[in-house]
Image: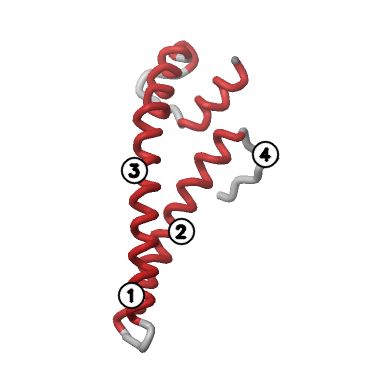
Amino acid sequence: MQAHAGSWSPVHFLYLNFHDAIRSELEDVQNDARSLLAPDQQVHEKLIGLRDRVRFLEQVHSYHSSVEDEVGFPLLFFSSMLFMDEFQPGSDIPFCAIADRMCNRL
């Protein structure tokens, strides 16, 4: 599903596209690493490039995890209590739906 800025709330748009961007970059790194199985004269440069991309992804993962721990999960907990009367027990409440409802209520 492709999100478009005009059809989703900003939180929903960022949530979907951020995870898609991480997945895409991981796939690209994996494909580039596989290309090293057939070495050529640029192996050293490719390894340096892969190292830098992996370090960047490690930082993205670290910051993203911190944000989820400090903001995302407390938001889910708070919103599940705030909207408890609107959802059936045991049902999954999508993060984006909660964020959209909170933005509309604030």
Q: Residue at x 35, y 59 (%)?
A: 54
In the rendered image, the residue lying farthest to the left is 37
Q: Residue at x 41, y 29 (%)?
A: 72
- Residue on which the image places disc 4: 7
Q: Earlier in the sequence, mark 4 or mark 1?
A: 4
Image depth: mark 1 or mark 3 in front: 3
Whole-angstrom CA distance, mark 1 to mark 2, is: 15 Å
- Residue on which the image places disc 3: 62
| Front one among 81 and 27 | 27
Give the quadrant of residue 55.
bottom left
Colour option used: secondary structure
Whole-angstrom CA distance, mark 1 to mark 3, is: 25 Å
- Residue on which the image places disc 2: 24
**Looking at the picture, which amino acid does disc 1 mark?**
Arg
**Looking at the picture, which amino acid does disc 2 mark?**
Ser
- Badge 4 crowding class, 10 Å Cα cut-off, few under 14, some 14 to 19, many 20 or more, is few
In the rendered image, the residue lying farthest to the bottom is 41
Image depth: mark 2 or mark 3 in front: 3
Q: Is residue 72 above or below residue 106?
A: below
Image depth: mark 4 or mark 3 in front: 3
Element at badge 2? helix
Element at badge 4? loop
- Badge 2 crowding class, 10 Å Cα cut-off, few under 14, some 14 to 19, many 20 or more, is few
Q: Is residue 5 above or below residue 101?
A: below
Whole-angstrom CA distance, mark 2 to mark 3, is: 18 Å
In the rendered image, the residue lying farthest to the right is 6
